[in-house]
Image (cartoon, rainbow, N blue to C red):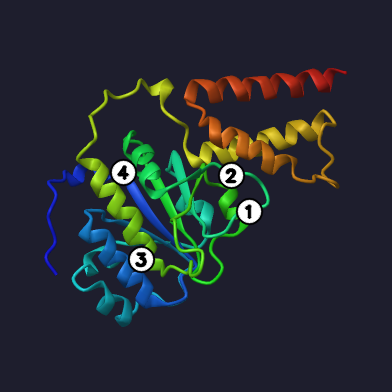
Amino acid sequence: MIVNKLPVSTALLDHINIILVGTTHPGNIGAAARAMKTMGLKHLRLVQPQHFPSLEATSRASGADDLLANAQLFEHFDESLHDCQLIFGTSARQRSIRWSTLSPKQCAKQALDTQQPIAIVFGREHSGLTNQELDRCHHMIQIPTSDNFSSLNLAAAVQVVTYELRCYVDELQQKPLLPPDEVPVSAEEMRLFYEHLEQTLIDIHFLDPEKPRRLMRRLQRLFNRAQPVTSEMNLLRGILTTAQNIHKKL
């Protein structure tokens, strides 16, 4: 096959991490690494792969074994997101709660319009990401497929998304760096904020921990869409702390 090579600065892709969660077949890990390398991406993270390292993964990588050798392994999903400011989760099915849903092309634009660390997450071959894992994502990616046959191989999904990233690099206009207090907060900072928010809502008797319903999930959707920056997060945490202190005095 003849492939037209696009002039791409791979440095523009260095902030993007591809995360595979709970991959059951090692061949899919190798094929995903090959898909990444052909499009200029190199940062692969694996969360609880069932079989890795694996000779089959290396074989399917077909020359992208350097990505496998440098892949980061994590026991817990949250750990794999610790330094990421913007998180995209892939899903082939609609969820019961409304999500911010993007096409791969729209994902590429958002991911490359910032140079902050990005995570693009792919779930298990048969069941995808859990609702709890998707709750940690700011946006959901859905790849358009046939209504009659929507099943897409894991590595093929990685190839589609990384191809759109590569294509958008050529269109990208470099933007000036944001001042430190205008940088979107990391996934770890968002996790700590949600813990603080939940505890505050319990303290002021707005949230019943015995009957939480979907309140926190809906609030996470709200703040994930907002993508607060550092200065905004400081303001939000200050409001929560003040509310807690006032309640203690009552």
Q: How far apart are marks 2 and 4 (CA)?
A: 24 Å
Residue 159: image location, x then y, percent: 32, 61
- Category of crowding for the residue at label 1, using alpha-carbon neighbours closer than 10 angstroms: few (below 14), some (14–19), many (at least 20): few
Which element type, helix, strand or loop, lies under badge 3? helix
Amino acid residing under circle 3: Ala
Amino acid residing under circle 2: Trp
Amino acid residing under circle 4: His
Which element type, helix, strand or loop, lies under badge 1? loop
Residue 129: image location, x then y, percent: 55, 60
Residue drawn at the location 70% of the way across and 41% of the way down = 216
Placement of 170 over or under 78, stated as above or below: above
Say whether marks 3 and 2 touch (CB < 8 Å): no
Amino acid residing under circle 1: Arg
Q: Earlier in the sequence, mark 4 or mark 3?
A: 4
Q: Nearer the viewer, mark 4 or mark 3?
A: 3
- Category of crowding for the residue at label 3, using alpha-carbon neighbours closer than 10 angstroms: few (below 14), some (14–19), many (at least 20): some
Residue position marked by numbered label 4 in the rendering: 15
Residue drawn at the location 23% of the way across and 41% of the way down = 169
Q: Earlier in the sequence, mark 4 or mark 1?
A: 4
Q: Which of marks 2 and 4 is nearer the N terminus?
A: 4
Q: Distance between the residues labelled 1 and 3?
A: 22 Å
Residue position marked by numbered label 2 in the rendering: 99
Placement of 44 over or under 206, stated as above or below: below
Quadrant of the image containing the C terminus: top right
Residue position marked by numbered label 1 in the rendering: 95
Indicate the quadrant where residue 198 lies. top right
Quadrant of the image containing the N terminus: bottom left
Residue position marked by numbered label 3 in the rendering: 156
Residue 57: image location, x then y, percent: 32, 76
Placement of 247 over or under 117, stated as above or below: above
Residue 107: image location, x then y, percent: 40, 44
Of residues 6 and 113, the one drawn nearer to the viewer in this rendering: 6
